[in-house]
Amino acid sequence: AFKIISPVFILVAVGLAGTAVYQWFHLVMPMYGPPYTAFYFVSTGIGIFLVSQILLHYYNCIMVSPGSPGPDDRQCKRTPGLRDVDCDDNNYCKHCKFVTGEDTQHCFICGRCVTDLDHHCPWIMNCVGRDNHKYFFLFLFYVTTGCLYLACFSVPPFYTITYYHKRFSEFQPRRIDHGMLSLCAILPMTLTVAVGGMMLWHCYLLGTAQTSPEFALNCHSKLRAYKKGQRWSNPKDMG
């Protein structure tokens, strides 16, 4: 199901970005004055930079390999250098039938082992692992920043026109799409909270050298050490 729905999610994500750019020029910026002014160029330049970074890191999330336990990104069973030996080994993958690294987990959607696997994300049709976790975080960061930036420009006219029933400025077009204006104000605020929360979570994970599955295991190890009167620290956290 993920392999079928992931391309749809990608099209939706790219469509949202394209719609935001179109509405910026067609609906939002005309509220603030005529084009080709210093304010127009600076505001639009910042917006274009944010959109370009969103698309760049989104592309990297999709195309960059999450990291395999071998020297390349082929499936474990085809990766040289891994040992097809002891099935009782703690790092033995019963699906690929190979012994992999200690920090490797098997993704059942991709059908391969991934080093430092955090999760499989349907929005990027890829796993988030060792080699693309930084791109995933940067994607979340720029999506949060871009949505917040758009909301700063779309919320004031939306609030003025909707709740006060007044013109936002003398430059406001006589006829505007109230439904689209509402969408341009509410959706970015919603995404700022939702994506921003995920961004902060992954900022914490990267800062403490953990993945989401490792966080749960580390909490259990820390609790077990606390009950024994001992102090536990993450061996991967270099401070």
Image (cartoon, rainbow, N blue to C red):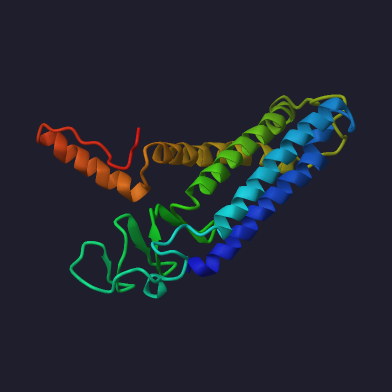
Q: Which residue lies at the image location 28% right of the left edge and 46% below the top edge?
A: 216
Q: Nearer the viewer, residue 46 or 123?
A: 46
Q: Identify whether 229 is placed above or below 122.
A: above
Q: Identify whether 113 is placed above or below 32.
A: below
Q: Decide if residue 178 is in sight here.
A: yes
Q: Quadrant of the C terminus?
A: top left
Q: How many marks?
A: 0
Q: Decide if residue 181 is in sight here.
A: no
Q: Which residue lies at the image location 63% right of the left edge and 56% below the top edge?
A: 12
Q: Position of residue 71 (x, y in %)?
A: 44, 64
Q: Position of residue 37 (x, y in %)?
A: 88, 28
Q: Nearer the viewer, residue 229 or 150?
A: 229
- The residue at the far left in this view is 228
Q: Position of residue 116 (x, y in %)?
A: 38, 53
Residue 210 lies left or right of residue 133; in this view the side is left
Q: Nearer the viewer, residue 16 or 99?
A: 99
Give the quadrant of residue 156. top right
Residue 225 lies left or right of residue 57; in this view the side is left
Q: Position of residue 74 (x, y in %)?
A: 46, 70
Q: Which residue lies at the image location 33% right of the left edge and 50% below the top edge?
A: 213
Give the quadrant of residue 86. bottom left
